[in-house]
Structure formats: C-alpha cells, structure tokens
C-alpha cells in the first residue's frame, strides 16, 4: 500500500562478499569495490525518446556515475527493477538518480534529479521530496475539475457541447477541501512541471493520450494561471493561447477549423467534438479519464500532440462516472457535478536495507 510522502523510494542492498565495516547498531562504513544493488519497486519503464535514468554515487569531493538503469523486457506497468554496481570509492555520502535527456552526452549529472538520499549505516533512502517537489509531499486532496466550454457559447449559446471541455476549477468550490474553486497541487522544482491529459480508454490496448498543456501552481499551491496551450487549437479560438475567459489550466475540443488551418492533428483514435462524459453502454465504465503527470521541464515547448506521458503519474480520475453519489441517483453520468481528482499512484516505492551476506 502506498503511503503519502513515500512517492519514490529505492532499496540499496549490499551484496554478499563484505565491504562493510561495523556491527550492531553502530555506524557502517562502505568501502571501495563493495558490490551493491539498487532495487526499484513499482518503477514504470521509460519509453523510447524519454531519456534514461542514471545512478550516481556522491562523496565529499566526488560524484561518479555507476551506470544507467535498463528495463529488460519491461512493459508499460510499474515493476521491480534492479541495477547492480560496485562502489567507485570508499565512504560515499549519498546516492542520486537523475533523468538524463535523450541524446545526452554530457558526463556530468543532469539537473533533472528524480530522487536522492544520504547513506546512513550502510544504506540510503531516496524519494522525490525536495528533488521533484519543492520539499513538500504531494497534495492528497487536490480538488475537482469541471466539464465546461465557453469558446462556442456566442455561436451556439449556452449550454453548447459542455462535455467537450475540461477545466481545472470546480463548479462547487465548497466541495474542495481547501475551499477555493482552483485545483491545489504541490509546487515543483523548476526542472519539473505538471501536464494534464484527457485519456481515451485509459489502460486498454487502444488508449489515446491527449495533452491539454503544462502548468505549475502558484506559491500558494493553487492553479491560478493558464497552461501553455490556452484553450487549445480545437476550441475554435483563432488566438487560442490568449483567447477565452478561463484563468486556469484546461482545454476545449469542439471543432477542428483552426487546427486544420495550422496543420495540427489529433492522435489517431479520437475526433472532435469530444464526449468526455461518455460511458460504455454495457459496463457503465467511463470512456475517458483525466490524468495529471509530472514531466521533465525539457519537454516544455515540444510540438503539440507529439509528447507522451512520463513515468510519474500521480493523479487520475474517470470522467464519465460524474461526482460523488452520482450513480446512486441515476444510471448515467451527472454532467453538472465536479469530477474529484484523486491521488492514485505514488510511483516507485521501496524499503531500504543493507546486508553483509545472504
């Protein structure tokens, strides 16, 4: 069971063969050439084009790479991944895991630090608190998003294809634990950013991820500014980066008339207008899910609809099932209810151990 605050952890196991000095509860020193292993639990594999995870050992005056993590035969789901190495020097102080950008040839660690931790009695615990986040744990009650469109209200009048727009504000601010209309998320380090997605058939073989832009919360953790794609090229707004009335992240997918002019196309498998509220008529499962990922900042500025979700995917909620208690009221979704965003995936977790023999 994932626990809040333990978003990413690493096991460091000192393999058989010694290399440890110390006993009992006293200090344990790690010596050069000690065989070791980093065991990641529930780590999603990186996909092609996302870069590589690299492990570094730090000391009083050195930072040395001990190799990049490989994912042999890995699929898409979180899994246990082991990475073996020998200590490059004695008395290391800590371990750092970085995301190295695609085509990286720089021998130094990248600034995209995924996790780090200090050695203590021959072991080290690593997490993303203070490396990906600003030092605080991930927000457990971010609030709700709403289905809403404004770009076509003049042309079609309200309501008009409301299920084709997703915005990170709540039509019922009183239902948000923090009491404001905006979504609340933990601020990130400058090298990381949030990205929002509308996902068709999440987790199925035909899933389609459609980004609605990247964004960061303000110092109060609230999403009080637009994302980097505004209302989006499928909103019908000619100046979609600046047009519209919403001041929060989100997007609308009502028409392709502007996208066609710009030569922009959606991923195969989805067409406009979106019906984000749709449910499977047999299973009553939501056809669409809302997902918020954490992405490396080097993805900012990538071509629209050509990016892919990174391995950190903390927030997800089905859209078509509506708000709390909706299904008990009627067997279809409740369009007016806010959709509660849930912290559903903590990412890699592990226990830290150090053993002198097996």
Image (cartoon, grey):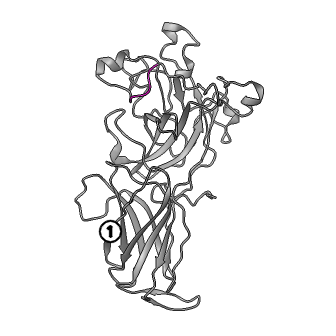
Q: Main secondary structure of the magenta part?
A: loop
Extreme residue in the left direction: 105
Residue 62 in the image, given as x and y percentages of width and height: 31, 76
| In front of the other: 27 or 47 | 47
Question: Which quadrant of the figure has residue 335?
Answer: top right
Which residues are drawn in magenta? 268-272
Extreme residue in the right direction: 328
Residue 291 in the image, given as x and y percentages of width and height: 52, 39
Q: Is residue 147 visible?
A: yes
Q: Residue at x 56, y 50 (%)?
A: 345
Tell me if mark 1 has few (under 14), some (14-19) or many (20+) residues whose alpha carbon lies within 10 angstroms of its own. few
Residue 56 in the image, given as x and y percentages of width and height: 36, 69
The answer to whether residue 295 is above or below residue 106 is: above
- Report if residue 213 lies within the magenta region: no
Q: The N terminus is located in which quarter?
A: bottom right
Q: Residue at x 68, y 24 (%)?
A: 332
Q: Residue at x 77, y 30 (%)?
A: 328
Q: Is residue 93 visible?
A: no
The answer to whether residue 44 is above or below residue 69 is: above
Number of numbered discs on residues:
1
- Report if residue 269 lies within the magenta region: yes
| In front of the other: 142 or 218 | 142
Q: Residue at x 55, y 89 (%)?
A: 26
> Is residue 36 rendered to the left or right of residue 176?
left
Residue 264 in the image, given as x and y percentages of width and height: 32, 25
Pointer 1 residue:
67
Question: Which quadrant of the figure has residue 258?
Answer: top left
Determine whether the residue tagged by mark 1 lies in a helix, strand or loop: strand
């Amino acid at each position: 069971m994932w626990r809040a605050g333990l978003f990413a952890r690493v096991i460091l196991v000192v393999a058989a063969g010694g290399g440890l000095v110390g006993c009992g509860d006293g200090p344990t020193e790690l010596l050069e050439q000690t065989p070791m292993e980093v065991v990641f639990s529930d780590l999603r594999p990186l996909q092609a084009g996302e870069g590589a995870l690299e492990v570094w050992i730090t000391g009083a005056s050195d930072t040395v790479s001990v190799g990049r993590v490989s994912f042999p035969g890995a699929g898409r789901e979180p899994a246990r991944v082991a990475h073996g190495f020998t200590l490059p020097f004695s008395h290391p102080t800590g371990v750092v895991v970085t995301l190295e950008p695609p085509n990286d040839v720089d021998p130094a660690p990248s600034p995209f630090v995924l996790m780090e931790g200090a050695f203590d009695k021959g072991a080290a615990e690593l997490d993303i608190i203070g490396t990906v986040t600003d030092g605080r744990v991930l927000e457990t009650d971010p609030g709700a998003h709403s289905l809403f469109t404004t770009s076509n209200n003049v042309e079609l009048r309200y309501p008009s294809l409301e299920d084709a727009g997703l915005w990170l504000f709540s039509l019922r601010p009183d239902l948000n634990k923090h009491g404001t209309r905006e979504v609340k998320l933990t601020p990130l380090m400058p090298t990381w950013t949030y990205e929002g997605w509308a996902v068709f058939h999440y987790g199925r073989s035909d899933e389609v991820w459609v980004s609605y832009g990247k964004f960061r919360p303000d110092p109060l953790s609230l999403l009080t500014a637009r994302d980097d794609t505004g209302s989006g090229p499928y909103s019908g707004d000619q100046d979609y980066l600046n047009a519209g009335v919403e001041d929060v992240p989100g997007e609308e997918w009502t028409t392709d008339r502007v996208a066609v002019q710009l030569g922009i196309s959606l991923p195969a498998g989805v067409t406009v207008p979106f019906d984000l509220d749709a449910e499977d008529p047999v299973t009553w499962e939501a056809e669409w899910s809302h997902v918020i990922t954490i992405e490396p900042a080097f993805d900012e500025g990538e071509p629209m609809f050509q990016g892919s979700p990174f391995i950190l995917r903390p927030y997800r909620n089905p859209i078509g099932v509506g708000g709390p208690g909706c299904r008990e009221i009627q067997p279809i979704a409740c369009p007016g209810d806010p959709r509660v965003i849930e912290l559903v995936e903590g990412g890699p977790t592990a226990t830290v151990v150090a053993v002198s023999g097996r």
